[in-house]
Image (cartoon, rainbow, N blue to C red):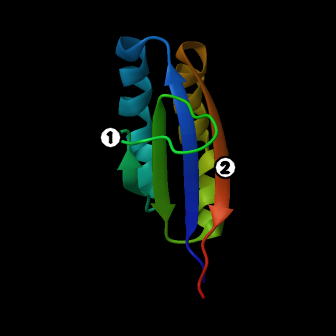
Amino acid sequence: MSKGYWVAHVDVDDMERYKDYIAANGEAFAAFGARFLVRGGTRELKEGAARARTVVIEFPSYEDALACYESEGYQYAKSLRDPVSNGDLVIIQGYDG
C-alpha cells in the first residue's frame, strides 16, 4: 500500500490566528497517522514561484490522507485557517518503485 502525502504551499496573513489552526489540526492528524516531514523551514527557491511556507505531511496510506482532509476534525481546523491564509494543497499517492 502506497503512503499518501499532503504537499501545501501557504501564505499566512495573521500568524497569531493561524496558531489556532495549528492547535486544532493535531487531533485529526493524529487520528489518521500523519507525520510532518516539512513544516516551514529554510529553503531556496530555484525555479518558478512559491508561497512563503511549504508543508509536507506523510500518511500511512493515500486513503488515510484523503480521509483526513474530509474528516470533521480537519474541516473544523480548516475553517480556522481559511480566513487568515491563502494556499495550495495537493494530496498525492507516494511512489513505491
Which element is circle 1 on? loop
Q: Is residue 83 above or below residue 81?
A: above
Q: Which mark is residue 90?
A: 2
Of residues 45 and 15, the one drawn nearer to the viewer in this rendering = 45
Q: Which mark is residue 71?
A: none
Circle 1 residue: 41
Of residues 48 and 65, the one drawn nearer to the viewer in this rendering = 48
Estimate how packed mark 2 is, as few (under 14), some (14 to 19) or many (20 or more) residues with alpha carbons within 10 Å.
few
Which element is circle 2 on? strand
Task: Name the residue rendered at 59%, 13% in the picture.
Answer: 83
Mark closer to the observer (1, 2):
1
Instruction: Residue 32: tell me if it is visible.
Output: no
- The residue type indicated by label 2 comes to Val
Of residues 41 and 49, the one drawn nearer to the viewer in this rendering = 49
Q: Is residue 93 left or right of residue 74?
A: right
- The residue type indicated by label 1 comes to Gly
Q: Is residue 18 left or right of residue 65?
A: left
Compare marks 1 and 2 and give the one earlier in the sequence: 1
Q: Quadrant of the C terminus?
A: bottom right
Task: Name the residue rendered at 39%, 50% in the picture.
Answer: 38
Q: Is residue 63 above or below residue 31?
A: below
Instruction: Residue 27: tell me if it is visible.
Output: yes
Task: Name the residue rendered at 47%, 61% in the picture.
Answer: 58
Residue 62 position in % (x across, y down): 63, 67
Residue 84 position in % (x across, y down): 53, 14
Task: Name the residue rendered at 50%, 64% in the picture.
Answer: 59
